[in-house]
Amino acid sequence: MKHVMIPDTQIFPGSKTEHIIAAGKYIKKHKPDKIIIIGDWWDMPSLSSYDTAGDKGWEDKDVKSDLEVGLTIMTKFLKTLRSFKYSPEIHFAVGNHEDRISRAESSAEHRRMSGFVNLEEQILEPLRKLDVKTYNFLDIFVLDGICYSHYFVNPTSLFPNPIGGTIESKLKNLGHSFTMGHQQHKQAGEIFTCTGERRRGLVCGRFYQDNHEYLGPQKNAQSWSGILMKHEVHNGDYDLMEVSMNYLLKET
């Protein structure tokens, strides 16, 4: 059993996307059984909480463009990797960037968005028509003994903030093999139970070419960009292989 993880792509109008098509070609060649798109495929900058009502970012035309470009690239990506002989399971977890749509729907400040933006109608339904299994924001789904979600909340915290700390501390707090996105830097680690069972934790990094100013030069430099392949997946354990952005672009 093989899984491949697609970390946060954060696609917006004008963003570079050739690496995504390169990933589709790589996946078609190596044929993992399951593809997990871990969330934040869409960036949705027009609905950023850093903008306020009346800003250019809240103009309807920008929201529409944000939605359309993500679905267009998703369709091209799936068309690139699928064939008559290869049709893998594809799983999509809603990330906090897609969840901006839900927050805009319910925001009193942006009540005019009601009826114009709808996560179910504009993202989840189109994905299901493309034969993609979808999961709501922070839903946990389990595949071959691994818990997946866009991110996990700290079970010891009163608030639903993303779990932090080292990968080992995440594993100890969650108590299960897990894989998540959300963070731009990659983390991978393992712990063993008293019976010798190995539990693996993975934070996938990112999968986009453009640096973000808000991260600053040091955080951007520490980010890792690429996809991750899990070989011999069984009962939460696997052999991990990194496939970097640079490798994918050179290969294709």
Image: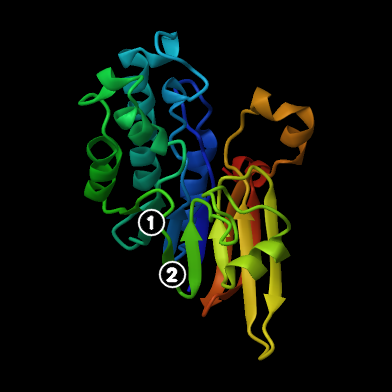
Instruction: Determine the residue located farthest toward the bottom in the rendered image.
Output: 195
122 displayed left or right of 148: left
**Above/below status of 58 relative to 35:** above
Q: Amino acid at mark 1?
A: His
N-terminal-most mark, 1 or 2: 1
Callout 2: 10 Å neighbours few (<14), some, many (20+)?
some
Read off the residue under disc 1.
91
Indicate how the structure is coloured in the image. rainbow
Verify CB contact (< 8 Å) between mark 1 and mark 2. yes
At 35% across and 62% down in the image, what residue appears? 89
At 69% across and 71% down in the image, what residue appears? 190
Frontmost residue, 26 versus 138: 138
At 45% across and 56% down in the image, what residue appears? 36
Instruction: Determine the residue located farthest toward the right in the rendered image.
Output: 218
Residue 241 seen in the current view = yes
Which quadrant would the C terminus be assigned to in this image?
top right
**Above/below status of 21 relative to 64:** below
Q: Amino acid at mark 2?
A: Leu
Instruction: Point out residue 173 in the picture as x, y percentages from the top left corner.
Output: 63, 66
Looking at the rendered structure, the secondary structure element under dot 1 is: strand
Callout 1: 10 Å neighbours few (<14), some, many (20+)?
many
Instruction: Point out residue 225 in the picture as x, y percentages from the top left corner.
Output: 64, 43
Looking at the rendered structure, the secondary structure element under dot 2 is: strand
Alpha carbon separation for disc pair 1 and 2? 10 Å
205 displayed left or right of 55: right
Read off the residue under disc 2.
143
Instruction: Point out residue 24 in the picture as x, y percentages from the top left corner.
Output: 46, 48
**Above/below status of 39 relative to 17:** below
Instruction: Point out residue 154 in the picture as x, y percentages from the top left corner.
Output: 58, 57
At 47% across and 64% down in the image, what residue appears? 32
Frontmost residue, 252 versus 198: 198
